[in-house]
Image: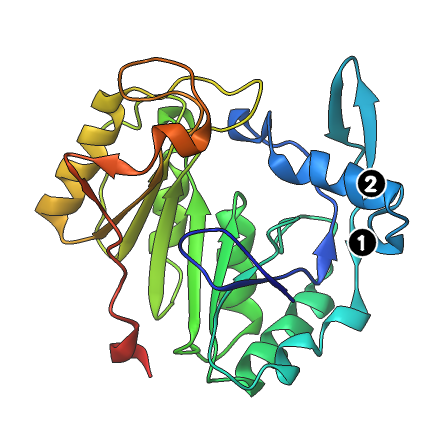
Amino acid sequence: MAETQIEWTDATWNPVAGCTIVSAGCTNCYAMEMARRLQAMDVEKYKGLTRRSGKRTIWNGVVREDRNALDIPLRWKKPKKIFVNSMSDLFHERVSDAFILKVWNVMRATPHHHYQILTKRPDRMGSLVAKKISDVLPNVWLGTSIENSEVSDRANHLRTIPAAIRFISFEPLIGSVGAMDLTGIHWAIVGGESGRSARPVREVWIDEIFDQCSLQGAAFFFKQWGTWGKDNKRRSKKANGRVYRDQVWDQMPDARLTL
């Protein structure tokens, strides 16, 4: 478990390490470079997960289940919002069903925490939940990432999964997502990309998500402009800030209703 600067959560928990690139939103994933740095610091869990491709660090396909990390949330007595697998994807095809169920058992045993699970593989999430998880845990939020209209169908998979809260992370937003059916979606996180190779975000793409959230009743959280501001100028993430439509949007789903 680690404290985090991610604006919409309190802490991260990484029982899985390593991943593979599945769509355009993965291209500049911060976790790839972070895994390389952790390997350089001799953190055993992250050794051998990445390779160099030109000037870039990318996943090499190794995915590691970390059984030693399973009991970490049990040690946290103060309630937290916990982002599950900020360094991987719990529903990666190389993570076993048995291990995912172990993660579920930990979440079941710690109802004082809220767990936020974000995947780019909501089809597998839905299949496993339907076949092997009989109860809807009120403290588990299930989400998927959508970076542009090419992967907007992930929302259709997510909508069918029984969950106390369903959410979509539109980050990094690298294109229009088009018309979205947000029925059954409680929360939307929106953000531009950061880093040296960041792709620009356009305000009109954010506008269409904001308007659809307003019309369809989903909470709206604007995480960042990232490296590119609304004026299409490149600056630091801090300089571009989080102000959208003249305010900071920190809306959250009403988790009180799920406990």
Task: Determine the CA span between mark 2 and mark 1.
Answer: 9 Å
Are there few (<14), some (14-19), or many (20+) residues within 10 Å of tag 1?
some
Q: Position of residue 248 (x, y in %)?
A: 23, 45
Q: Are the residues tagged 2 and 1 within 8 Å (C-beta)?
A: yes
User: Residue visible at 13% across and 37% down?
Assistant: 211
| Pointer 2 residue | 49
User: Residue visible at 52% across and 43% down?
Assistant: 120
Q: Quadrant of residue 29?
A: top right
241 or 81: nearer the viewer: 241
| Pointer 1 residue | 64
Q: Quadrant of residue 138?
A: bottom left
User: Residue visible at 64% across and 83% down?
Assistant: 74
Relative to 247, say whether 82 is above or below: below
Residue type beneath disc 1: Arg
Left or right: 165, with 219 as reference point: right
Left or right: 106, with 204 as reference point: right
9 or 181: nearer the viewer: 9
Q: Position of residue 126 (x, y in %)?
A: 48, 57
Q: Position of residue 47 (x, y in %)?
A: 88, 45
Please state, as top left, top right, bottom left or bottom right, where the N terminus lies in the image: bottom right
Q: Do we see residue 128 in this rendering? A: yes
Q: Position of residue 115 (x, y in %)?
A: 49, 68
